[in-house]
Image: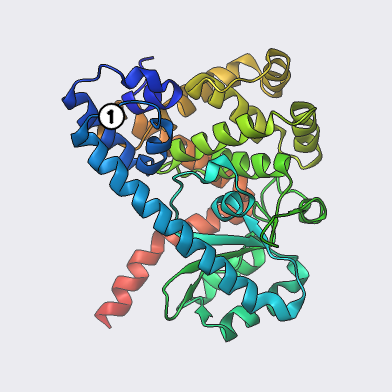
Amino acid sequence: MTLPLLTRVYSNPQAALGLALPDWSLLIRQARNANMLARLGYVLAAVAVPAPALVHIQSQLTFARRFSSSLQWEIDCIATALQPLGIPLVLLKGAAYHAAGNTAAQGRIFSDVDILVPEAELAQVELALIRAGWSSGPIDAYDQKYYRQWMHEIPPMQHIKRQTSIDVHHNILPKTCRFCPDAAKLLARAVPTPGGYWVLAPEDRVIHSAAHLFLGGEFNHGFRDLTDLDLLLKEFSAQPGFWEVLLSRAAELKQTLAVSLALRYTGKILHTPIPAAILEQANLALSPVRWWLFDALFLSALQPDHHSCRTAWSNCAEAALFMRSHWLKMPLHLLVPHLLRKSLKPLEVLWEAKE
């Protein structure tokens, strides 16, 4: 298959040399839609970018630097709110990459801070955040039950003054998911950051990123998330024995499938350097027929979210993966009533409005 321009340039920045201005225009638009424009600026740091394109990239890099400062302030505020509890502040995803100084933090812009706390401490953590100005806002009784009984997080909270958001997790996957790991194992191996916060161990950061992307079912930021994995794998592979530890830890946390998918598609799409023996071992996770099916789905769904990157198959692939994610997330005896409830919700709202 012919890869989109952004995909090719990300994997090989020298491919940008000699692009005509219309191609640069397309590249900028693809990157902007994929929430990758600032990251593209880092990728093209050693490439001579023409002035019309450079203006857009530099503007987004400036925004990314300001975002980084605001993010640090927000993390500090969360830490202050939770400090009386004596619970280590374990950051997840983008906030974790920022705190740990990972290359995956470069140009990464996102909307909320994710933290991981022991499930037994959820009530205390939620109360402390409410006292500090966060609120989950209006949510009906069914959605409260959905989050608190079945999911891996409480309802998202937003600060009443700053309008910033926080997701409080007690695990990285829903309780009802067949691949839900033991969160205590994640917390037990968490490591401190220079700023005094905590993040998951390197291999667990990769595992969480893989689980979020390949079991989650949402692909509007799929390409950006795939580049997260690319950057994490490149950075952590410098550690002796990293690849073996990653596969072993994935098996321990029931994430062999997610990690195998991550290794296959970072390699196929972004040409991430992965040892052949590791790829061979990862490929054992599925039969050739299932790999053929997943290739048809993921190679389409993981391209940048721009109309020029889509094919006639894209919508079908994303819909199939979305349905798969629900099937993985909940057993059928919970999933069917849940989907029925959600499908009837618009009618319920319309009926209440008429009354």
* Residue at (65% x, 51% y) in the render: 173
Q: What residue is drawn where x is 77% and y is 75%? A: 86
Query: Which amino acid type corresponds to the residue marked 1 in the rendered image?
Result: Val
**Residue 354: image location, x then y, percent:** 25, 79
Q: Residue furthest bottom?
A: 131
> Residue at (72%, 81%) from the top-left corner?
84
- Give the colouring mode of the picture: rainbow
Q: Quadrant of residue 152?
A: bottom right
Nearer-the-camera pick, 96 or 261: 96
Q: Nearer the viewer, residue 168 or 182?
A: 168
Which is nearer the eye, 193 or 207?
Answer: 193
User: Is 275 left, or right, of 301 in this rendering?
Assistant: right
At 22% across and 29% down in the image, what residue appears? 50
Name the residue tied to disc 1: 49
Q: Position of residue 41 (x, y in %)?
A: 37, 37
Image position of 91 (left or right of 7): right
